[in-house]
Image (cartoon, grey):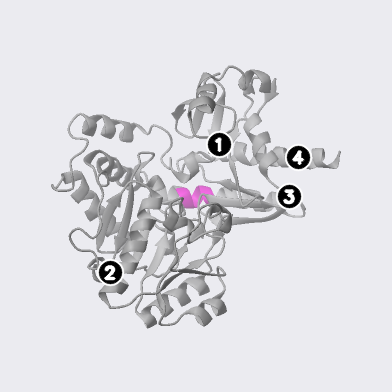
């Protein structure tokens, strides 16, 4: 038997990873795309999930920063039930109330002027790319969008063209029109910015890149240069947005406002929805027929996203993320002092990365055995993005399990 820090017992690895009918069917019928962990999750509630062997886990990954209100929040479940019994989908040839109400709400919380709805983060970024190019076209220009080293914006051809080389392998010819520069390098940004640039895009906090925050100096300079050259500043807030950092959007910590922002993940509390918000001036680049979607902005997805906003306000989730994130980060920083295994603890709110001095995959596996789900980004950064409603006690368990798992891997490496 394996005991996790909370005092609960997980069955032996052999038993936990035993029968797995879903695993066997997936291996036979699903595209072999994911390096899956050998458990089948069947139920979730709050910050916890259960597998088909009734083992309980604290979810410190939250579907990769998606389930920010926890699994099966009662208000979200009720909204899905109510709206699905009323109206789930209509074409965008017609108006629908949840879509209009959500657009109004996102304009309010983002400080921007108009919104387009889609179904995912990658679609939101594709929309942002098209909007940027269309804006340049309307001004009689073509050119490049500046992107950042170590970034990740999605899996479509357009979005992989902006990010890491490893996601581009085997997909030539890669779309052109993008130029990467070092992230947080102000001098590189200043040197590259000229009349050939039609936009600048960056993640306010790089997620897949290892939880790396944009520096205030870099973001302020990017805003200033975009203003100078009259091109849009585009922020990817797919992972760091919707209350995760202690504010509705991470850029609100910096005192600047983008021209375009892409959002998804936590926007629908687990229900698929994405959005692009933009200023009035930039949004005018789109006109009838220049962009669109079948499923984006459907009544069901929009009703869920609108309820998500209501719950965030009602339960003061932004403040919850700030306080509990500060607690988790402080605990990790205190533990990392004079411990060579941990190089750095970084992040904002409940978007935290623990950079190790060795690869983190085995640490994630050890945490899984002890009842905590986590993830490793950029080879050696343990990514902790739990539900924002997580309790202090659950945070303590996550930290304790992480520490124990690091020590076990360290010890095994010494043998």
Distance from disc 2 to disc 3, alpha carbons, whole Å, reads 44 Å
Q: For marks 4 and 1, give the one nearer the viewer.
A: 4
x 51%, y 73%: residue:
218
Distance from disc 4 to disc 1, alpha carbons, whole Å, reads 22 Å
Q: Position of residue 109 (x, y in %)?
A: 31, 57
Distance from disc 2 to disc 1, alpha carbons, whole Å, reads 43 Å
Q: Please say if the residues under marks 2 and 1 sit with CB atoms less than 8 Å apart.
A: no
Q: Is residue 175 left or right of residue 113?
A: right
- Mark closer to the chain start, 4 or 3: 3
Splitting the image into 4 quarters, where does residue 106 fall? bottom left
Q: Please say if the residues under marks 3 and 1 sit with CB atoms less than 8 Å apart.
A: no
Q: How many numbered callouts?
A: 4
Is disc 4 surrounded by few (<14), some (14 to 19) or many (20+) residues within 10 Å? many
x 18%, y 44%: residue:
91
- Mark closer to the chain start, 3 or 1: 3
Is disc 2 surrounded by few (<14), some (14 to 19) or many (20+) residues within 10 Å? many
Q: Which residue is mark 4?
A: 409
Q: Please say if the residues under marks 4 and 3 sit with CB atoms less than 8 Å apart.
A: yes
x 39%, y 77%: residue:
226
Question: Which circle marks residue 358 in the picture?
Answer: 3
Between 151 and 197, the residue placed more toward the observer is 197
x 55%, y 77%: residue:
188
| Residue 348 seen in this snapshot | yes
Q: Which residue is mark 1?
A: 394
- Mark closer to the chain start, 2 or 4: 2
Q: Which residue is mark 2?
A: 282
Q: Is residue 148 magenta?
A: no
């Amino acid at each position: 038997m394996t005991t996790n820090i909370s005092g609960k017992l997980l069955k032996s690895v052999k038993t936990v990873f035993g029968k797995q009918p879903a695993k066997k069917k997936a291996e036979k019928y699903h595209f072999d795309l994911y390096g899956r962990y050998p458990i089948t999750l069947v139920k979730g509630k709050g910050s916890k999930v259960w597998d088909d062997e009734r083992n309980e886990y604290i979810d410190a990954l939250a579907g990769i920063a998606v389930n920010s209100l926890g699994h099966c929040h009662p208000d979200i479940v009720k909204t899905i039930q109510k709206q699905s019994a009323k109206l789930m989908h209509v074409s965008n040839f017609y108006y629908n109330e949840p879509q209009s109400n959500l657009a109004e709400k996102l304009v309010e919380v983002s400080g921007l002027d108009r919104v387009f709805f889609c179904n995912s983060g990658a679609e939101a970024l594709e929309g942002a790319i098209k909007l940027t190019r269309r804006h340049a076209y309307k001004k009689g220009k073509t050119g490049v969008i500046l992107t950042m080293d170590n970034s990740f914006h999605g899996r479509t051809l357009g979005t992989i063209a902006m990010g890491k080389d490893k996601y581009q392998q085997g997909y030539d010819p890669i779309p052109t029109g993008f130029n990467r520069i070092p992230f947080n390098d102000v001098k590189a940004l200043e040197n590259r910015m000229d009349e050939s640039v039609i936009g600048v895009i960056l993640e306010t906090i790089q997620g897949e890149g290892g939880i790396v925050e944009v520096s205030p100096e870099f973001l302020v300079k990017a805003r200033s240069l975009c203003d100078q050259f009259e091109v849009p500043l585009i922020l990817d807030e797919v992972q760091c947005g919707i209350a995760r950092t202690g504010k509705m959007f991470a850029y609100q910590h910096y005192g600047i406002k983008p021209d375009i922002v892409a959002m998804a993940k936590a926007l629908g509390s687990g229900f698929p929805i994405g959005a692009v918000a933009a200023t009035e001036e930039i949004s005018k680049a789109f006109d009838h027929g220049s962009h669109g979607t079948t499923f984006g902005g459907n009544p069901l997805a929009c009703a869920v996203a609108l309820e998500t906003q209501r719950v965030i306000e009602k339960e003061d989730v932004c403040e919850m993320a700030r306080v509990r994130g500060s607690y988790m980060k402080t605990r990790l920083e205190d533990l990392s002092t004079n411990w060579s295994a941990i190089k750095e603890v970084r992040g904002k709110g409940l978007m935290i990365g623990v950079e190790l001095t060795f690869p983190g995959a085995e640490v994630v596996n050890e945490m899984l055995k002890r009842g905590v789900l986590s993830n490793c980004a950029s080879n050696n950064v343990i990514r902790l993005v739990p539900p924002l409603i997580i309790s202090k006690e659950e945070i303590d368990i996550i930290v304790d399990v992480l520490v124990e798992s690091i020590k076990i891997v360290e010890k095994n490496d010494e043998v």
